[in-house]
Amino acid sequence: MNRLLLSSAVAIAVSIGSSALAKQSSPLAAFDTDNDGTVDLAEVNKAAEALFVKLEADNDGTVDAKELKGRFSKKELKAADPDNDGTLTKDEYLASVGVLFKAADPDNDGTLDAKELASKPGKALLRAIR
């Protein structure tokens, strides 16, 4: 009987641990800084700004396709680059992230839940800010 109780306790502990780990590693948990179960544009922009600083390795104030490392398709990069110079300033990058956020928010509630982040537009947003 004690072995059965011990195995049940271990199984429950493993299940809880796996569940907590899955939540921590989920895209939602990575960006949901206020832990409300959704991600809003302010949270996305915070992550995007930090990533821009990290990617902008040559300190010229812009990121190019090489620095973006595949986070934008050629089409997305062209759309995000209104002056057609082949680079994005931080403002251009954040504006593009905003467009991607809006595309991932079909109910226009200003937040993204796990289901919206798992959609094709949500994945494009995540690709741009990870």
Image (cartoon, rainbow, N blue to C red):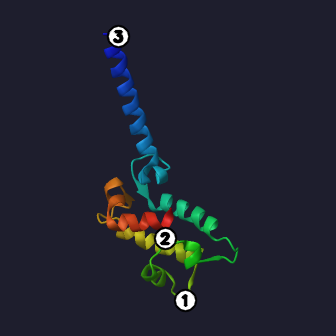
Secondary structure, mark 2, is loop
Q: Residues within 10 Å of mark 2 (few under 14, many from 20)?
A: some
Write down the residue under mark 3. Answer: 2
As drawn, the label of residue 110 is none
Q: Amino acid at mark 2?
A: Arg
Residue 89 visible, this orientation: no
In the rendered image, which quarter is residue 19 located in?
A: top left
Image quadrant assignment for residue 105: bottom left
- The x and y percentages for residue 39 are 42, 55
Give the labeled residue for mark 1. Answer: 83
Residue labelled with disc 2: 71
Amino acid marked by disc 1: Asp
Q: Residue at x 49, y 70 (%)?
A: 71
Mark 1–mark 3 Cα distance, whole angstroms, equals: 71 Å
Which mark is in front, 1 or 3? 3
Q: CA distance from mark 1 to mark 2?
A: 20 Å
Residue 58 visible in the displayed image: yes
Residue positioned 55% across, 78% down in the render: 65
125 to the left or right of 90: left
Farthest residue, direction top: 1
Q: Tell me the kind of residue under disc 3.
A: Asn
